[in-house]
Image: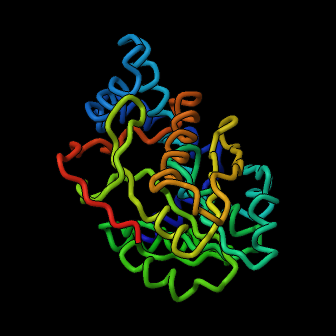
């Protein structure tokens, strides 16, 4: 299996995109991969859109999804020059200025654009980057993913369950702590709830708790596909490393509003196949901020 993964990643992009074109129709029409979830997520997020518009976004999403899948495998053979050419980094000084002062930064993003190629681009900044990730169920694919993500160095992968301890151990190291902050929490009663894309939505509190405990600035990374095979990653400061005057939940609110704005502008580039809204808002919510 590992041999097949690596072999697939050696093919040139034009062949992989040809395969992605076929996979799009297979996923959309033949096997209807998570089609019910995708259409339901889109319909609830954009109640003002017609059925035709929702189906059009869904079809565009399948093209984006299959491109993402094949581009992930291409990570095996991507060179530094290819990454620098294909992933544009905007406003890097927002993060770099803090690191130059010895201050770590929390970098938060949603599941949009190409987060796998974004990891490669982060590695090429030559900064230390701690990537908090969810361990995959398939051991072979999980190991393959780790190898691909760390191919350029400067990437420390921290499995979500161990991230709290490792963050404390590494708190004095000037680095970028990277979080995909739009995943669905497993415990809705201890999550932060807000309106997001016209729905009650739960968010992990870890991003804000880390920021407050260690006084780290929080920066949003917008990941957008400009055209096939080319992406931009744009930094935007969400919060300075001093939060005395910010109410609890304000950093998460800022992240939610900024990500929501980006999704509305580029709806086909969000991970609609994810069961983001699988939990209902509980009557009792207990959040520990400290």
Can residue 19 be seen in the rendering of this structure?
no
Image point (37%, 70%), residue name: 135
- Image quadrant containing the C terminus: bottom left
Whether residue 150 sits left or right of residue 42 in the image: it is right
Q: Quadrant of the N terminus?
A: bottom left
User: Outermost residue toward the front?
Assistant: 245
The percent coordinates of residue 251 (x first, y second) are 53, 53
Q: Position of residue 221 (x, y in %)?
A: 64, 51
Query: Who's the residue at 24% across and 59% down the image?
Result: 187
Q: Nearer the viewer, residue 74 or 225?
A: 225
User: Which residue of the protein is positioned furthest toward the bottom in this rendering?
Assistant: 169
Q: Is residue 259 visible?
A: yes
139 vs 212, nearest the viewer: 212
Q: Is residue 103 above or below residue 195?
A: below
At 70% from the left and 49% from the top, the residue drawn is 236
Above or below, 182 relative to 263: below
- The residue lying at 36 percent from left, 40 percent from top is 273
Reply above or below: 250 against 1: above
Q: Which of the 4 image quadrants contains residue 285?
A: bottom left
Q: Position of residue 185 (x, y in %)?
A: 31, 56
With 36 as the anchor, is 139 left or right in this view?
right
Display colour scheme: rainbow
């Amino acid at each position: 299996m590992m041999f097949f993964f690596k072999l697939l990643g050696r093919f040139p992009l034009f062949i992989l995109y040809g395969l992605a074109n076929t996979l799009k129709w297979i996923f959309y029409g033949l096997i209807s991969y998570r089609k019910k979830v995708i259409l339901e997520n889109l319909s609830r997020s954009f109640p003002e859109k017609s059925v035709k518009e929702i189906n059009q976004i869904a079809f565009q999403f399948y093209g984006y999804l299959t491109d993402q899948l094949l581009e992930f495998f291409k990570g095996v053979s991507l060179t530094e020059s290819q990454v620098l050419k294909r992933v544009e980094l905007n406003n890097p000084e927002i993060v770099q200025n803090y690191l130059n002062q010895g201050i770590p930064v929390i970098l938060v993003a949603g599941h949009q654009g190409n987060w796998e190629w974004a990891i490669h681009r982060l590695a090429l900044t030559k900064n230390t980057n701690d990537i908090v990730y969810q361990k995959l169920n398939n051991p072979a694919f999980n190991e393959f993913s780790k190898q691909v993500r760390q191919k350029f160095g400067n990437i420390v992968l921290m499995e979500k369950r161990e991230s709290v301890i490792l963050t404390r151990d590494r708190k004095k190291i000037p680095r970028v702590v990277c979080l995909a902050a739009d995943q669905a929490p497993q415990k809705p009663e201890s999550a932060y709830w807000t309106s997001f894309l016209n729905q009650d939505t739960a968010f992990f509190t870890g991003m804000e708790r880390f920021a407050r405990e260690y006084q780290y600035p929080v920066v949003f990374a917008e990941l957008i596909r400009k055209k096939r095979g080319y992406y931009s990653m744009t930094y935007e400061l969400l919060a300075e490393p001093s939060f005395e005057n910010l109410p609890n939940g304000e950093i998460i609110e800022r992240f939610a509003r900024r990500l929501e704005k980006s999704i509305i502008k580029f709806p086909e580039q969000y991970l609609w196949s994810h069961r983001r809204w699988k939990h209902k808002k509980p009557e009792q919510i207990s959040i520990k901020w400290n």
